[in-house]
């Protein structure tokens, strides 16, 4: 098991096959999928397929979403991290910042904490020049997280018939924002 980031309260590591129940608990919740096309999964097998898809990204792209684990309880909280995205925006490929948490962990600053750690990893360890993110315009919480951590709103675009906000942050903007904290 590869641990990428450890904070005071979290372990951020590769997703593993034994995370299937955690992925199921996360992605079978209709409220979690409210702004994700409203297609929650229905079986453990689908959770296993999600994990296999993400683990394949590790092999193909050297990066993919990571499990977020509560250090005190060892509970699967959700996922976070970067992935190399080639489908969301038809006009470009880019490194995408994302996070998804089980409902019981909403509102505790975990998305913000893991997103900041993911940006640091992308810029400091992977030496990326730019990281992007998208959020449904109606997903107020996710839009707030992206703005709070320094991503800049660029435009609204259509994805599967729904308006989404597009954000970016460059390495130089990240370094400047770190120096201002």
Image (cartoon, rainbow, N blue to C red):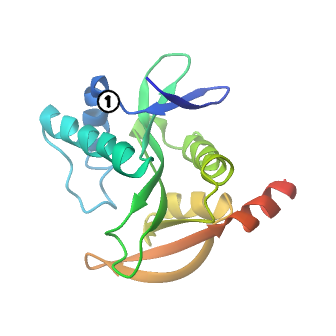
The percent position of residue 30, horizontal first and vertical second, equals: 25, 49
Identify the residue shown where x is 47% and y is 44%.
Answer: 80
Q: Residue furthest right?
A: 180
Q: Is residue 57 left or right of residue 9?
A: left
Quadrant of residue 79 in the image?
top left
Quadrant of residue 43 in the image?
top left
Identify the residue shown where x is 34% and y is 70%.
Answer: 88
Name the residue nearer the viewer: 160 or 139.
Answer: 160
The percent position of residue 24, horizontal first and vertical second, equals: 24, 35
The percent position of residue 95, horizontal first and vertical second, equals: 49, 61
Within 10 Å of disc 1 (Cα), the crowding (few <14, some 14-19, many 20+) is some
Name the residue nearer the viewer: 173 or 127.
Answer: 127
The percent position of residue 3, horizontal first and vertical second, equals: 52, 28
Q: Is residue 47 above or below residue 16?
A: below
Q: Residue furthest top?
A: 73
Q: Is residue 87 above or below residue 61?
A: below
Q: Is residue 155 above or below residue 122?
A: below
Q: Quadrant of the N terminus?
A: top left
Across the whole image, how many numbered discs are drawn on residues? 1
Mark 1 residue element: helix
Q: Is residue 158 left or right of residue 154?
A: left
Q: Is residue 78 above or below residue 72?
A: below
Identify the residue shown where x is 53% and y is 64%.
Answer: 143
Identify the residue shown where x is 44% and y is 47%.
Answer: 62
Residue highlighted by disc 1: 22
């Amino acid at each position: 098991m590869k641990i990428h980031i450890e904070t005071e309260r979290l372990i951020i590591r590769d997703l593993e096959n034994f995370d299937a129940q955690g992925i199921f608990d996360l992605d079978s919740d209709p409220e979690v999928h409210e702004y994700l096309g409203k297609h929650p999964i229905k079986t453990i097998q689908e959770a296993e397929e999600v994990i296999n898809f993400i683990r394949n990204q590790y092999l193909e792209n050297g990066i993919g979403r990571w499990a977020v684990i509560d250090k005190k309880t060892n509970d699967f909280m959700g996922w976070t991290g970067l992935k190399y995205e080639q489908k969301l925006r038809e006009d470009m490929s880019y490194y995408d910042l994302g996070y998804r948490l089980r409902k019981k962990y909403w509102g505790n600053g975990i998305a913000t904490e893991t997103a900041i750690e993911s940006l640091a990893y992308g810029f400091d360890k992977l030496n990326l020049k730019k990281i992007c993110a998208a959020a449904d315009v109606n997903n107020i919480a996710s839009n707030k997280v992206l703005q709070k951590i320094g991503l800049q709103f660029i435009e609204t675009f259509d994805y599967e018939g729904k308006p989404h906000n597009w954000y970016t942050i460059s390495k130089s903007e990240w370094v400047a924002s770190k120096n201002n904290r």
